[in-house]
Image (cartoon, rainbow, N blue to C red):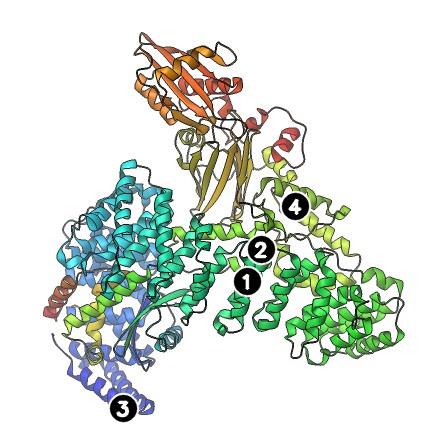
Amino acid sequence: MGSTMRGLSVFISDIRNCQNKELERLRVDKELGHIRTRFKNEKGLTPYEKKKYVWKMLYIYMLGYDVDFGHMEAVSLISAPKYPEKQVGYIVTSCLLNENHDFLRMIVNTVRNDIVGRNETFQCLALTMVGNIGGREFAESLAPDVQKLLVSSSCRPLVRKKAALCLLRLFRKNPDVVNVDGWSDRMAQLLDERDLGVLTSSMSLLVALVSNNSDAYWNCVSKCVKILERLAKNHDVPQEYTYYGIPSPWLQVKTMRALQYFPTIEDPNTRRSLFEVLQRILMGTDVVKNVNKNNASHAVLFEALALVMHLDAEKEMMSQCVALLGKFISVREPNIRYLGLENMTRMLMVTDVQDIIKRHQAQIITSLKDPDISIRRRSLDLLYGMCDITNAKDIVEELLQYLSTAEFAMREELALKAAILAEKFAPNLSWYVDVILQLIDKAGDFVSDDIWYRVVQFVTNNEDLQPYAAAKARVYLDKPALHETMVKVGSYLLGEYGHLLARRPGCNPKELFAVINEKLPTVSPPTVAILLSSYAKMLLHTQPPDPELQEQIWAIFRKYESYVDVEIQQRAVEYFALSKKGAALMDVLAEMPKFPERQSALLRKAEDIDADTAEQSAIKLRSQQQTSNALVVTDQLPANGSHSVGQLKLVKIPSQNMEASSVDEGRTEVYGAVSKVDPESASSADLLGDLLGPLAIEGPPNALIEEEQSQGIEANPSSPGALALAALGDQPNSAQPIVNIAERFSALCLKDSGVLYEDPHIQIGVKAEWKAHHGRLVLFLGNKNISPLASVRALILPPRHLKMELSLVPETIPPRAQVQCPLDVVNLQASRDVPVLDFGYRFGTTMVNVKLRLPIQINKFLQPMTVSAEEFFPYWKSIPGPPLKLQEVVRGVKPLSLSELANLFASLHLGISQGLDLNPNNLVASATFCSDNSRAILILIRVETDPADRSQLRLTVASGDPILTFELKELLKEYMINIPVTTPVVAPLQAQTPAPLQLEPPVTPVTNDPGALLAALL
Amino acid sequence: MIRFILLQNRQGKTRLAKYYVPLEESEKHKVEYEVHRLVVNRDPKFTNFVEFRTHKVIYRRYAGLFFSMCVDITDNELAYLECIHLFVEILDHFFSNVCELDLVFNFNKVYLILDEFILAGELQETSKKAIIERMGELEKQE
């Protein structure tokens, strides 16, 4: 076992023999003193001794002692000429220092020399240290050398695998060091590697690269699938790389992880191969006795599940996954149960499996009572995710019950989640109030202020609720040992609405005052402030004045006039003075106005929980997106029949002051999920201001609301005013697109996924699925920078024939993150018009605004058909001529061969009927057109070409709908005449011309239709 | 990625600590203390995963020693759990029937083995044979 250092062993023995910590410290101090003296007089030190002392220092460091003085000694050994000392230098430095340490700067050169030098062992040492603690400086100066080693044909795999991971570290420190252009081909080559050590390391590198920019590495997709086939299907690996009979489970996992970063797998063959492997993993993983084998095979299985979820596989496979997870969450084996719960939660975020998962609700609730906190946490997350209107009552009540016994570590999260669910899915408002009050009662310490502010907002805005809430508060205030938050919310509610209870027993003003005032001596200053306001309100509501009550309250005001806290002192002084003014008090202390609608601070808080991961995970990105969808649920049209989601809207009052906001609101409702930019002023701090602040004494409350509303409009770029401005071209784009927008659009009209737009900051990708007259597009908004994109907004301007709903686009896109925004489309009738995406964002001080046509062209709603001669001819003959059958000789046609034409037709979703037309120069195609307004309409098309003159052809289109016939004929003409250059209909949008909108028939402006509004303005 | 790897005994003595993210000295002590407290009292029937701050600790107990890896919450838990076991198998092979004392007296070797096994917080080599052979090569050079 090689050389051992006797001195080191003796020292370790000595330490072990120390009876207590004190003796250990003495022994360590003695040793450190010795080492220090020896290092001071370096001349007498042999390399062996140096090495021994540095190891000793590491040992002492591990015991928890400070060895700063020796950092220099460790670092200096790196420059030693011989391996043994150099090795110690590198290893101990990696342990003692972190990447930010100044000493590391001094050795960049030495390290580089070792990396580029000829000594393989030195190369390995240097790569290892840089891989473990290299920082930005190393990244900038060493990346090219490390890249060279990785692809070098003369290096042993030993060096190359270290180079791969070293490069990964450098890339994480500074992504710019890997030049995408040159590197993607190399990366693909690396995946052909036979050595599994190099391959494993390279795969980790690939995961980091694709998580950052999957587009550049698409050429790696098929290679990854090949690797998976090699491992999972062919078992083609050396014996030493199998682990309990499983071909490197780690490489399998990593490879599947890499594939999850590609939005989709387009090539049908690759896709088929991949699904075959995945199917094999899903079906072929059995539970075995050996723990290690079981774990390893399930590691692979769970990764396969994640990949299937990501690829949105055919429904059949997805239901297999759900079935598997359902099995897992009820097994005894804790790890598998944990992972079952965790993956079920993830699955909720990517697909619509709520109903199936609900069947397991009882089982999941059982796990909420598991003795293992890890399992309880997963169960809580899952319950939170699967909650909707149908099960909210059960789930929230379970959470409340659990709250009393939960450990402190979980209570705050539990309280927050219960409050959010109660708000989102309350069957009625009084239930919501009950839940929140119970929450405060049971776990007051863990109920953040936001939670009680929110309940006050609801009560304020819903008159029906006010007496109920006040009565509830009255009951709670009678309880002994109240939590202070309950005192706050209770006295606030009674101050505002206590007078509504006047006729009930125990609720006359004096009694209410007494029950609140009982708490005064024991509460903290912020609560005292609320109590004072409540007293003032009580004075106001007691008409005619009750002299006795008045005297009591005045006495308290006077007492606090000299209070040490300024806020309280001011309130006392002002309330006292005001309350002597009689009528003036009425104005100033009038009931609090209704709160403007705003995003729940609670939801925002839940969203803020940040995950710190090395790579943004694809599933994580989706889930983030999903969370933000949930956040605006109150602003959205009810989805999947859960009508109550909107129920807890803060109710709007139809007063004049609110008009501006009603318009705004209307827009939001029509479009469901236009990105809504909340002004900063709606922060939770401001809520505090609303409740406790100067509003009540500074004058007519409406003024503030008005101000807020107007701010809201200014800050909301998607309000009509801002929209008009943008359309007039007042905001030139300061970020130039780096793709040809028109070309991208044309390409996407013929296929279902790809890049729609890209500039230096953002890339917008599209992936679409079509089913009859329904379409689902997912917009992938990818931030390419290392700083966030802010003020992101996306507004859809749909043509009249499409019904569209875009889910919420988050206001900011985190650095290097991609968010996915689903867009649902329903086709109503035939039209060549396409919708426009009005998209904007801010990067630093740069505002960028673009209008992009979305590739939702009429052909997307076609379903290709092949018809037989018996079907074709009778129908063809039954349609005599215009307007149902239109014929046109098209001239200036691009020279297309018949097969090219057939391909074009196929990508337009037109089915070619081979051999139907006896003339080999002709082409017959058919399809059905699907719209929401009518049954599917059959379309027949015939193209007659002249082999002698390819520049012209005769086109005949027939269908049962004259508009459809015309629009389709025109569309086909566009494609035949000129592919893919733009035509007037598809005018370039960079110039921000409003052209596509002008094509709409003129309509009377309707205030809640921005498209129409814009058209009218123009 | 692996944030850090800890090898601690039941009393909380650190036998090996390797950090792949930059932490300050005081922070490292805190982490070691907290992770020990987190895992030491867990029932053997519990999961091998426990949330730690914004990450997850995957741990496994071998006799009186706890091997803990702190990984991202999105990472594949079971893959890392078996990664721990593979590491233990390598140690076992290298020291022929490893025990805690081997790791104490040869802590320097343990660091060497770890560097052949994991780099930059990622798995570098999963062949036991390759690592043992590599250790042989290195010992010859000393």
The subunit letter for the residue under badge 3 reads: A
Q: Is residue A149 in view? A: yes
Q: Earlier in the sequence, mark 3 or mark 4?
A: 3
Which residue matches tag 1?
A396
Measuring from the top left, give residue A882's x and y in whole percent.
Answer: 51, 11
Q: Earlier in the sequence, mark 4 or mark 2?
A: 2
Which residue matches tag 3?
A18
Q: Are marks 1 and 2 in contact (CB under 8 Å)?
A: yes
Mark 3 → mark 4, Cα distance in angstroms: 72 Å
Measuring from the top left, give residue A791's x and y in whole percent.
Answer: 55, 47
Q: Are marks 1 and 2 on the same chain?
A: yes
Mark 4 → mark 1, Cα distance in angstroms: 39 Å
Kind of residue indicated by mark 4: Glu
Kind of residue indicated by mark 1: Val
Q: Residues within 10 Å of mark 4 (few under 14, many from 20)?
A: some
As rendered, which of A838 and A481 lies closer to the eye? A481
Q: Quadrant of residue A373?
A: bottom left
Q: Are marks 1 and 3 on the same chain?
A: yes
Q: Are marks 3 and 2 in contact (CB under 8 Å)?
A: no
Q: Residues within 10 Å of mark 3 (few under 14, many from 20)?
A: some
Quadrant including the C terminus of chain A: top right
Mark 4 → mark 2, Cα distance in angstroms: 32 Å
* Mark identifier at residue A714: 4
Q: Secondary structure at mark 4?
A: helix
The subunit letter for the residue under badge 4 reads: A
Q: Earlier in the sequence, mark 1 or mark 2?
A: 1
Q: Secondary structure at mark 3?
A: loop
Kind of residue indicated by mark 2: Phe
Mark 1 → mark 3, Cα distance in angstroms: 55 Å
Q: Are marks 4 and 2 in contact (CB under 8 Å)?
A: no
